[in-house]
Amino acid sequence: MSTRHFLSLLDLTSDELHNLILRGIELKEYRKEGQVVDTLSRKTLAMIFDKSSTRTRVSFETGMTLLGGHAIFLSPRDTQLGRGEPLPDAARVISRMVDGVMIRTYDHNVIETFAEHSAVPVINGLTDLLHPCQLLADMQTYFEHRGNIAGKKVAWIGDGNNMCHSYINASIRYGFTLAIACPEGYEPDPDILSNAGDRASVIHDPLEAAKDADLVVTDVWASMGQEEEQKKREIAFASYQVNSALMQRADPAALFMHCLPAHRDEEVTTEVLEGPQSVVWDEAENRLYAQNALLEFLMS
């Protein structure tokens, strides 16, 4: 059987992704009840970080511990990867010693090259192109609060970035429609968008995109590595803030999500972030359980 990787949501089927939601919820309940789940006993996950993170590191490292396994944190500064070792060589070596590899990096080609030469499953912890693990948590969170998201409307407000790309892929696998509101010049990758067909569309007007939405999602205007564009982006995205006026355009039962960390009163007001429709803290917590379900699926 060939090695399964998780570089994109499209690497798994809709049924597999739905089962991950159910398993994530089950693992969450087990932990609340104090039950021990050691499905990854004696298994080791190598975690390679080119990009720093709070939620990704804590959730994967804690997750491996909860499943009875072990996680190793690796940064370029501490390994030969930071001294010019060819990526295919590193993949061959590391994958002979561990049971899975999670990589959080910039260039998506890095993770694809590593997976091509890895003997064990490789998980995309984030690239500049995609952030599929966050979508697992988001979909689990929606399911917990509102049930199946199939047939619902999601509004993406902001940059056509890696999170937007993963929401486009999610629309294909989970069966919802996606309205993307972004300024001109900040649209998502056209190939990723076209692959979704009529599931996803760009609507530059944020109020129109949010109309009757069941879920409203945003992200920071300038992602890691784009700090020099901050002022320029603040001007371009000034009318794309998620605030109470925008949320009032959505369905009264709509939820609000943000992958965090948030720039309060920039892309989202504190009123919305801390408001009754916001589920961002559940969403952040569910990174742990959704990824535990994924780790089990790939590594057990």
Image: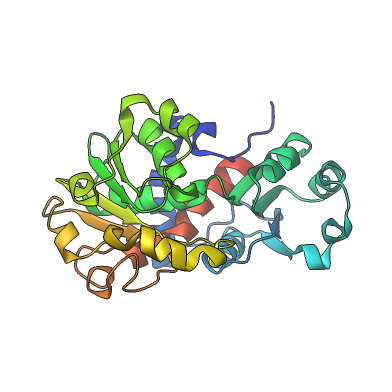
Residue at 14 percent of width and 54 percent of height: 253
Front in this rendered view, residue 248 or 34: 248
Split into 4 quadrants, where in the image is the C terminus? top right
Q: Is residue 220 visible?
A: no
Query: x and y percent of residue 153 in the render?
Result: 23, 41
Residue at 19 percent of width and 46 percent of height: 213
Query: x and y percent of residue 31 in the render?
Result: 44, 64
Identify the colour scheme used.
rainbow
Seen in the image, is 228 located left or right of residue 160?
right
169 is higher (above) or lower (below) than 39: above
Q: Quadrant of residue 147?
A: top left
Front in this rendered view, residue 43 or 238: 238
Seen in the image, is 155 located left or right of residue 95?
left
Total numbered badges shown on the rendered structure: 0
Query: x and y percent of residue 234 in the render?
Result: 39, 65
Front in this rendered view, residue 283 or 213: 213
Q: Quadrant of residue 145?
A: bottom left
Q: Is residue 139 visible?
A: yes
40 is higher (above) or lower (below) than 229: above
20 is higher (above) or lower (below) than 103: above
Residue at 20 percent of width and 49 percent of height: 210
Split into 4 quadrants, where in the image is the N terminus? top right
Q: Quadrant of residue 77?
A: bottom right
158 is higher (above) or lower (below) than 195: below
Seen in the image, is 22 located left or right of residue 53?
left
Front in this rendered view, residue 64 or 207: 207
